[in-house]
Each structure stands twice: as structure tokens, then as C-alpha cells.
Image: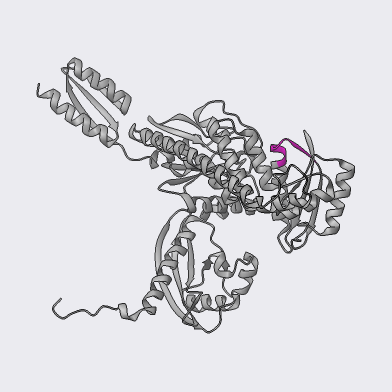
Amino acid sequence: MERIIAVDISGRHRHNSRYLMVCAAVSLSVSGGHVKQIHGVNIKPFVSDNPPEVVDVVQMIERTVEGMGGVIIVAEEGDLFNQPEWLSNSMFTASFKYPESLSERMGIEIAHHISLSSRNLLLDPRSWEPIKDNL
Amino acid sequence: MKDVILVQRRIPRCSESENQRKLAELRELARAGNYNVVSEVIQTRNPDRQYQVGKGKAEEVAELALSEKPAKIIFYNPLSVTQVYNLSEMCKCEVIDKFQLILEIFASRATTRRSRMQVELAKLEYELPRARKIVSLLKMEERPGFMGLGGYEDSYEQDVKKRISRIKKELSTGQRDSENLRGYRHSKGFSLLSLAGYTNAGKSTLFRSLVDENVEVENMLFTTLSPTTRYLNINGRWTLLTDTVGFIEDLPHFLVDAFRSTLEDVFRADIILLVVDISEPVDVIRKKLAVSHEIFWEQLEKATIISAINKADRLSPEELSSRLKSIAYLAPNPVVVSAKTGEGLDELKDIIYSHLPEWKRFTLELPMSGESMSAVSWLFEEGIVHSINYGNTVVMDVEARNEVYHKARSLEKRLSFR
């Protein structure tokens, strides 16, 4: 069984002349074909006037995984602008790799849904429904 | 055997072992395409728009082509239409890339009408984005007779599109038929097993050892192109084992899609036997397993993966256990086997059995009558009869799937009330 942190960033496109991004990190124990256990989730929102560059992405990921324990970070190639793995790995202080197994991809999918739904929640506070007293 | 020259443009700072492996794969592909490699040209640089390799290197290839007189020059890297045109003009020889070579191999191995259509579809899909460019290059040296004057870039592209949609329509009817066949096999109580894995991992050898039959096995890539399905009895349970076409690294999507029907058997199986060649270097195994996982991730429905760690006879026990440790996270449910010597096949069957859809074991008591006897023979066909005692009544200890269990119970009730 392997401990990984699966990471995904949502919102790397312009929205109202700014970039509102949410990075989600999910700490998991995985085997070759299954996710065995989810240990925790960290979510961190980021805002920028300019489109993020590779170094910004690395920084966002490192800030989000802070305090999650020293295990390997896994993120999709696309998040790191399709750089070769050795180059991305050299930019991180922790160990980093692109997904290989089915379970690692599953972890990234979980992180993706978390980051996307958190971003939607932050972008639209009007959707917050008040709970009536008589309910 | 025709002679060919292989050309590989290597990406700067890419690891040497990976480059070597890719070139070896191209060499194997050329061999599978019935070509004899007379020379290999390698250059490390970023791609050139005109020639893929640098102009100087392209001239070197042209000189080599002049002296060696090969039938073809095969590039590892994908070539654009302009690059193919420029290179063939310079070398005065046919120039193709790896994907065209794969298509050629597929075309030569395609035996059924369906697989021939798939090859044609893959060829057309490869050609489609290039159709306009091909015509405009041909127009550069226009001669009377080539479709006359006018904007035929469009009409040629339209022709290709029409042919694609016609083939797709025909293939989809065939696909429905095979889906029905699979549904029928399931309803008959067969569990579906599929062999999957990288090409040349030993899938066909394992298939042959498991079903004890002579399936074409060769030390060559893409020996299996049409899937072969056979009965396989696993501890009394009947399953259908399918041997499928091997995966290959960087296989473009138009090829994967075109060969969906051969891979579909993999994706619709209850259990996938992922065959791994453990005798290769660890980084190669890891890379190949990662490619397999990537293909599964895109297509897999509901299936259990069992990793058959093949060619274990080529390694010492210490080496084997260290390799197993380093690939453990990519190989779910591993079983060490040697398809060649037959070692580990019983363990493999046991683990397959433990993952098969569950059957019910029950005792059945039927009165002595003609109708009961036909029920007994039906149960022998549909399930596993562990024991049978003929006395005043027939008492059977049977294992069968749920539908059979319910049918047998209602039969028992009906017959005993008579």
C-alpha cells in the first residue's frame, strides 16, 4: 500500500478579469487497483491578476499540501503544462510524479471534483440557501 | 524481406535507456512488418519543421538511401505531410512514420471483413487532417488528368469524410451484434476473462497454456490481431477466455478507437488478466504498466484486474522478489507464472476462481421420476454437481448461479407436490 497526495487545480482561466483558482489536495492510501483509505483533504483558494506560470502552480500545490505529511505528490501532466516528469519533480521540494496506476488517477479525480465544486461554491455566494426556522 | 532504414529523432535530455527502448520497439515493429533493417540513423535535437531531423541529417539519410537502396525509410517520430513530401523528394524513396508502419502491419494481418474495415477506417482517419495538404502538394506539380481545375481540396476531404461515416455505420451494426453475443454469454452463465497487456508480453503463450490449445504464438509484435475466444474450465466453472491485441506505447487515439472492437473484449470482461513480462528492466515494466493503466482508465467498466507476472523462469528468485516489490503498486492481485513451463498456472486459476461472480451451493431433493431425471441432466449442464445420491429420492449437492438456484428450487417444489 502506498501513501500519496493527489492534487488538482480548478479555474486556470480568466473570470471577471482575474484568475480565481482552487487547489485541492487529497491524502490517500492506495493499492494498484483501489483507493483503500482517504486520510484528509486540504483546499486552498488563490487569486491572481495574471495567468499562472509553472512556478506559480508549483507554489500553489506546495502551499496546499503543507502539513499533510511527507509523502509523494501526484498531479496530472496538464497541470504542470505537460513538462517532462524529471523537470516537474526537480521544481518541488517534496517528491513529485505524474499518475501511473488506476488508483492514482482515481485520487486525482476525487481532488478534481473537490476543487471544482469548492470553486463553484466560492464564486456564487447567492446560491447559499438560508435555512428557515420552521424547517 | 524488403530493406529499410530506421530514423529516430531523440528529444534532448530524454533518458538513454528510454530512447534505446523506443528504437528497439521500432526495430521489432519493422520485423513484424516483414522488413529487414539495414541501417539506423539517430539524431538528438528539437524537431525541424521541414524534415523532422536537421537538414544535414536528412541529407545524410538521403546519401545512405542512395547507397543502401532501401524500399522504405521509417521514422520513429510522427511526420507531417510536408515532412513526408520533403524527405521523399530528397531521398527518392518512400518515407513513412511509426503509425503508418503499424497500419501496414494491421492491414497485412487483418483476415476478417470486420478487421479489414477497421484498418481502412484507421487509415482514413489518419489521412483526414492531411487530405487538404496532400491535394495542395499534388497541385504544386499539377498535370492534366488530376481531377481537372478548381477547388478539389474540399471535394477530396469530403470523399474521405463520406467513406469514414459509411464504414463507421457498418461497424456499429457489427458492434451491436457482438454486444448481443456478450449478453448471451453472460446469461448462459459464462464469466468472461480477457488477457490484456503490452504487446509481446506472452499473452498468447499464456492463453495456449491455459486452454491447452495451439494458438499462433510468435516472438513478434501484433501476432494476435483478431480476438480468439475459448472455453476455460476453472475448478468446475466454465469461463470464456479471450486473447486480445497487445497495447503499445503512444498509440494514437485514432488507432485505439479504430481497434475498439478488439479491445472491447478487454473492457467488457469480468476479470482482466494483465500479463506482465517480468524479465524486462524494471523501468520498462513500470512504463508499460503505466500505459496499460492509462488505457484501462479511459475505457474500463467493471472488472477485477489480476496481474499475471509472466516469464518468471528467466529470473533468479531474489531478482524476482526485488522486481515484484518495485512494481507492486502498479500490479494488482499479482500471481507469478511462467506460461512456457506451466509454473504458477494452478495458483492463477485459483485466484481467478476466487474473483469469479459468486455462485450458490445448495442441496436439492427430487422425487424419482422422468421429469426429475431431465432436471438432473439440466443441473449437470448449468452448474457444478458436487455429489448425487440415488435412493427413494435423488439428493444432489449443487453449485450454480442465482437464476439456476431459483429455477431449481421452484422445480423441486413443483415436482414434490405431485
Q: In which quarter of the image is the C terminus of chain B?
A: top left
* Residue B101 makes an appearance in the image: yes
Task: Find the residue positioned furthest to the top.
Answer: B370
The answer to which of A50 and B380 lies nearer the viewer is A50
Task: Find the residue positioned furthest to the front.
Answer: B149
Q: x%, y% of residue B411?
A: 18, 27
Q: x%, y% of residue A13?
A: 51, 75
Task: Find the residue positioned furthest to the bottom.
Answer: A49
The answer to which of A104 and B4 lies nearer the viewer is B4
The answer to which of B10 and B343 lies nearer the viewer is B10
* Residue B78 makes an appearance in the image: no
**Residue B37 vertical position relative to residue B43 in the rendered view, above or below:** above
**Residue A18 vertical position relative to residue B136 in the rendered view, above or below:** below
Occupied quadrant, residue B67:
top right
Residue B29 appears left or right of B394: right
Q: Is residue B161 magenta?
A: no
Residue B372 appears left or right of B102: left
- Colour mapping: one colour
Q: x%, y% of residue B178?
A: 43, 35
The answer to which of B77 and B327 lies nearer the viewer is B77
Occupied quadrant, residue B219:
top right
Q: Quadrant of the N terminus of chain B?
A: top right
Residue A12 appears left or right of B1: left
Q: Give the range drawn in magenta.
A: B30-37
**Residue B349 vertical position relative to residue B385 in the rendered view, above or below:** below
**Residue A16 vertical position relative to residue B62 in the rendered view, above or below:** below
Q: x%, y% of residue A97?
A: 57, 65
Rendered residue at 38%/79% (across/down): A122
